[in-house]
Image (tube, rainbow, N blue to C red):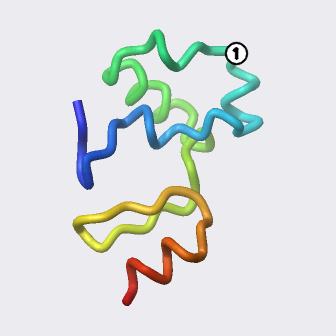
Amino acid sequence: MAYGAGVSVKNLVNPKSRNFLALDIDLANLSEDEVIDLIEENPKIMFRPILTDGNQLALGFKELQFENLIK
């Protein structure tokens, strides 16, 4: 299932995050609902910041994407 801006909830998880790695979970084997629960319990596993213009989404700090969204 895709959410706003065509992004799956799984795409909100930063697989390189220390917090995510400490969980030792295989993200590919989780359902979207399980990922939602995981994020609710461990919000630090998400990419930060998240910026949107209502149509597009930039995950993590990517200066060029941010500039394009606010133009």
Question: Which residue is drawn at the image coordinates 56% and 50% (left, top)?
Answer: 47
Q: Is residue 29 left or right of residue 54?
A: right
Tag 1 secondary structure: loop
Q: Residues within 10 Å of mark 1 (few under 14, many from 20)?
A: few
Could you tell whether 62 is left or right of 9 in the image?
Answer: right
Total numbered badges shown on the rendered structure: 1
The percent coordinates of residue 4 (x first, y second) are 24, 51
Q: Which residue is at a point 66% across and 30% down the rendered structure image?
A: 20
Q: Name the quarter where the N terminus is drawn.
A: top left
> On screen, 34 above or below 63?
above
At label 1, the amino acid type is Asp
Q: Position of residue 59 (x, y in %)?
A: 50, 56
Tell me the residue that label 1 is attached to.
24
Percent of width and height locating residue 36: 38, 30
Percent x, y of residue 69? 39, 78
Which part of the image, by quadrant, shows the C terminus? bottom left
Left or right of 7? Residue 11 is right
